[in-house]
Amino acid sequence: MKETIDLLKSGFLFNRDKLKLLVILIFSVIFLTMSIEYIFKKGSEQSQLLWVLSILLAENFLTCGLYGSLKEIISGKNLNSIVFFSNGARFFSRFLIIKFCFVFFIIFLGTFLFLIAYAVGKMTLPGAAGFAFLWLIWLAFPSYFFVMALFAPIVLFSQNSGVIESIKKGIIFSRKNIDRLIVLVFFFIFLGGFLVYLPEKIYNFSSGFWTVCKSVIISVLEISFISCLLFFYQKESKNEGNI
């Protein structure tokens, strides 16, 4: 428990360089949110698709710049524009491929669940129950590795490794440290829900001021969360002699 608390303190500790990244992220979140809202209110479906694709690619570059720079800061290096843009370019393609892998699996899983539901509706009750049970067992195996592989981006930014190596090491690391990772993930999910989702639902906030406040909260939580994961991976990897 003490290690987790110390890790959270490290994640929420903002020096000057992390504050610079925070400002970049806040403006990025506000700009991307407003751009998407504007795009879907204006223009044809074809233009909307092209603009959304452009925004997603821009978001991918910004994320690579942010997370790569965050790793540099945690390692004791200073932030400047060269560091930010070089990290954005260095990790752009590999991070995008990892994202596509995750999206492909979600589509794959969703398709099979749809087929299960469709097949079950055509069978008798005992046959449907047995068929669904067998398919869910079969799907549980790849789903388990998918969840473990969600740590792959942290490995990518920490070690500047390839896509396959990042996914492989992400699975291995997650399996060894799943208990502490779950604590971190649920802590930030709970905190985000308490600070963003709950006030929005209770008070029905919809003003521009709330959009800015929400962007600040989300940005602080995101940088703190990624910092915790990077700190955690570096610490454990050093203990195991992998870095």
Image (cartoon, rainbow, N blue to C red):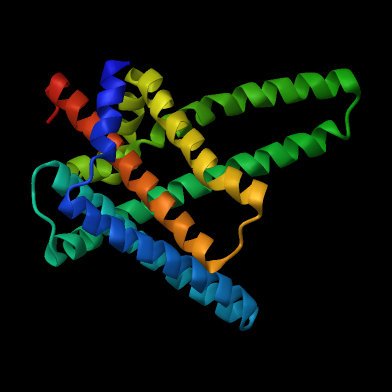
Q: Residue 220, position in %: x, y?
A: 36, 48
Which residue extends farthest left? 77
Closest to the observer: 126 or 211? 211
Which residue extends farthest right? 124
Counting the numbered discs, the total is 0
In this image, 99 relative to 231: left or right? Answer: right
In this image, 238 relative to 98: left or right? Answer: left
Identify the residue shown where x is 74% and y is 34%. Answer: 116
Q: Residue 78, position in %: x, y?
A: 9, 53
Answer yes or no: is residue 91 visible: no
Image quadrant for the N terminus? top left
Closest to the observer: 22 or 162? 22
Identify the residue shown where x is 15% and y is 66%. Answer: 81
Q: Residue 177, position in %: x, y?
A: 33, 20
Does residue 222 sit above or below 238 in this rendering? Answer: below
Identify the residue shown where x is 56% and y is 76%. Answer: 38
Identify the residue shown where x is 47% and y is 37%. Answer: 191
Q: Quadrant of residue 63?
A: bottom left
Q: Quadrant of residue 230?
A: top left
Q: Residue 218, position in %: x, y?
A: 43, 50
Does residue 30 sit above or below 147 in this rendering? Answer: below
Image quadrant for the C terminus? top left
Which residue extends farthest bottom? 43
Answer yes or no: is residue 149 visible: yes
In this image, 171 relative to 30: left or right? Answer: left
